[in-house]
């Protein structure tokens, strides 16, 4: 396994704007297991007022939300993807996000970096965050009301 340092990454001000502007977040790799990080982060974001959209290969509902098998199956607007998959999957996820045309934020969780996919997403006009936890970043920003 090769470790990458994120060469493309949003700063704190950009992350603040991300959380202020997004409404719907597709959680790619959202586990139904409440002990898993993806479940904890998604639950936190849901409680913070964001529409969570689980992307997972099985289950019908997670966190009381309908589960979709892929980004292309989601029939409504998505603002952000939050990825809990191996970095090797990022290129396909970036391609799917670009194909949708509505996703504005490409977010890879702690330890997840793929600069090639990040470049694709950035070139398509998305904000990119790599190797940061959405829950930790949101909590650190405190009150995000306008």
Image (cartoon, rainbow, N blue to C red):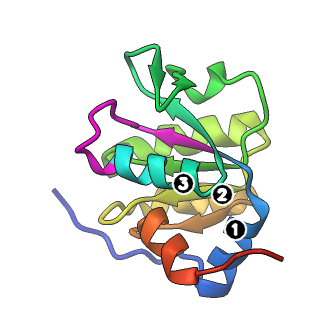
Indicate the quadrant containing the C terminus: top left, top right, bottom left or bottom right: bottom right
Residue drawn at x 58%, y 82% is 141
Residue 105, labelled with which disc? Answer: 2
Q: For the residues labelled 1 and 2, say whether their Cβ atoms are less than 8 Å apart.
A: yes
> Image quadrant of residue 17?
bottom right
Q: Residue furthest right?
A: 146
Residue drawn at x 72%, y 40% is 78
Q: Is residue 21 part of the magenta span, yes or no?
A: no
Q: Is the magenta stretch mostly helix, strand or loop?
A: loop
Cα separation between marks 2 and 3? 15 Å
- Tell me the magenta residue range: 25-37
1 vs 3, front mark: 3
Cα separation between marks 1 and 2? 7 Å
First in sequence, mark 1 or 3: give its number: 1
Q: Percent position (x, y) of residue 46? A: 56, 48
Residue 18, labelled with which disc? Answer: 1
Residue at image mark 3: 45
Q: Quick one: label 1, few (<14), some, or many (20+) residues within 10 Å?
A: many
Q: Quick one: label 2, few (<14), some, or many (20+) residues within 10 Å?
A: many
Front-lying residue, 117 or 42: 42
- Horizontal side of 34 relative to 43 (left or right) equals left
First in sequence, mark 2 or 3: give its number: 3
Residue 111, labelled with which disc? Answer: none
Residue drawn at x 51%, y 51% is 82
> Image quadrant of residue 108?
bottom left
Front-lying residue, 106 or 99: 106
């Amino acid at each position: 396994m090769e470790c990458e340092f994120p060469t493309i990454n949003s700063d704190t001000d950009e992350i603040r704007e991300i959380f202020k502007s997004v409404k719907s977040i597709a959680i790619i790799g959202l586990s139904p297991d409440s002990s898993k990080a993806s479940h904890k982060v998604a639950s936190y974001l849901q409680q913070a007022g964001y529409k969570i959209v689980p992307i997972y290969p099985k289950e019908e509902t997670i966190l009381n939300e309908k589960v979709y098998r892929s980004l292309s199956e989601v029939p409504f607007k998505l603002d952000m993807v939050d990825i809990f998959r191996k970095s090797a999957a990022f290129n396909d996820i970036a391609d799917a996000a670009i194909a949708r045309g509505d996703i504005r934020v490409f977010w890879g969780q702690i330890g997840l970096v793929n600069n090639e996919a990040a470049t694709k997403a950035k070139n398509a006009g998305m904000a990119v965050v790599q190797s940061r936890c959405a829950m930790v970043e949101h909590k650190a920003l405190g009150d995000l009301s306008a």
